[in-house]
Image (cartoon, rainbow, N blue to C red):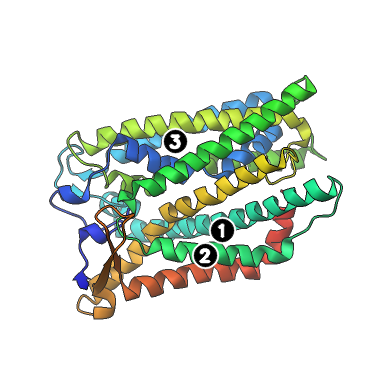
Amino acid sequence: MDIKENDESRVITPTELQPHDSVSARTGTLWTAVTHIITGVIGAGVLSLAWATAKLGWIAGPAALIAFAGVTLLSAFLLSDCYRFPDPDNGPLRLNSYSQAVKLYLGKKNEIVCGVVVYISLFGCGIAYTIVTATCIRAIMKSNCYHREGHNATCSFGDNNNYFMLLFGLTQIFMSQIPNFHNMLWLSLVAAIMSFTYSFIGMGLALGKIIEKGKIEGSVRGSPAENRGAKVWLAFQALGNIAFSYPFSIILLEIQDTLRSPPAEKETMKKASAVAVFIQTFFFFCCGCFGYAAFGDLTPGNLLTGSGFYEPFWLVDFANACIVLHLVGGYQVYSQPIFAAVERWLTKKYPQNKFIARFYGFKLPLLRGGTVRLNPMRMCLRTIVFSCGDVYIAEEDPKLDATMASS
């Protein structure tokens, strides 16, 4: 049967400013918010923090991790106060996206600039997740090859990257059609569990390497470089890696919009941010420091995909598979705001168009509520978005392949 779109068919999306509460559409709690944040921020990048720590050294590396944690928490607290307007506790207007908050507080011109930057960043995150997925699948194949042929064997599977990305894109096209994504707690839970799993595996393998060597590698100044300029460049790259790993500002208001009240959404969001940042910092600190202590100046760009570990090969394979499963959920967290912005604009501009406004529903037992709503415009739009990302990656594949091979 066909049904009209309503608020419940939205999925962690920004909508128009709402002057009233929609209780049925907001059932999130402290722990669902923590889960969404962890799904969005504790990605495979946590495994590259050992490289960042190696470039900064034993003093600047841990200090940078703690400093960026504090900055992230402060920005989250400030932004959570912007959700309701004019009163942050009981204001009648809800600002359901970062761009809407910029529009209301800073004006239309700033919203346009911010929107361009934010949506390009979100699209870039989707591209990065696709690349990392291909890297992890190739790492599984290389791990099996090294196990069979020996650690000095030439194991190259670069020509297959496009197939891996295509498979990931097809999976995302299916996942993006499911309504009420933020209410499908099972998917966020699976993604969060996967992130914990591969993080613990990376930490455990690094700790085992330290015990095997019987000493802690590394130095106060970090790994050496050819000259002072190269050292400064690597240090800034390391700081960029750490800075990129922490923030979730561009998705904070979308997550906050899923929370029920009372208590006030801002209070729940602040608690969720504090819990999530603490968990982030723990994993980032352990993975970064354990990895550097294990490999020292030879720390790879990624503990699991950079040939840092060969055995036990099955555990390395399992960890990379966990990364892939996590990225399936993490991709949606960053892509849904893009879809919502375009779909909201089209719906507002062509409200009577059946191709845009009409939804067709059928039952699916895994969903809360049991009904899947499919919309022709949504299917076409999201397929195009995924295709554009995959085409861009395919055109840049030689450069990206070289980058992934060196990581």
Front position in the image: 64 or 298: 298
> Which of the two discs, 2 and 3, labels the residue nearer the N terminus?
3
Q: Amino acid at mark 2?
A: Gly
* Along the viewing direction, whichever of 4 and 393 lies nearer the viewer: 4
Q: Residue at x 57, y 36 (%)?
A: 199
Q: Report the side of 318 relative to 111 (left or right).
A: right
Q: Earlier in the sequence, mark 3 or mark 1?
A: 3
Q: SS class of the residue under badge 3? A: helix
Q: Residue at x 70, y 27 (%)?
A: 208
Q: How far from the left and from the top, in percent, is residue 368? A: 27, 52
* For discs 2 and 1, the disc positioned in front in the rendered view: 2
Q: CA distance from mark 2 to mark 1?
A: 8 Å
Rate crowding at label 2 as few (under 14), some (14 to 19) or many (20 or more) other CA atoms within 10 Å.
Answer: many
Task: Report the residue marked by disc 3.
Answer: 72
- Which element is circle 2 on? helix
Residue highlighted by disc 1: 130
Whichever of labels 2 and 1 marks the residue nearer the N terminus, that label is 1
Crowding near the residue tagged with mark 1, few <14, some 14–19, many ≥20 C-alpha atoms within 10 Å? many
Kindly indicate whether the residue at mark 3 contacts the one at mark 2 (C-beta within 8 angstroms).
no
| Residue type highlighted by circle 3 | Thr
**Residue at image point 20% right, 63% down:** 6
Q: Are marks 2 and 1 in contact (CB under 8 Å)?
A: yes
The residue pinned by badge 2 equals 169
- Classify the position of the N terminus by image quarter: bottom left
* Distance Cα–Cα, label 3 vs label 1: 25 Å
Q: Is residue 89 visible?
A: yes
The amino acid type, in three-letter code, at marker 1 is Thr
* Front tag of 2 and 3: 2
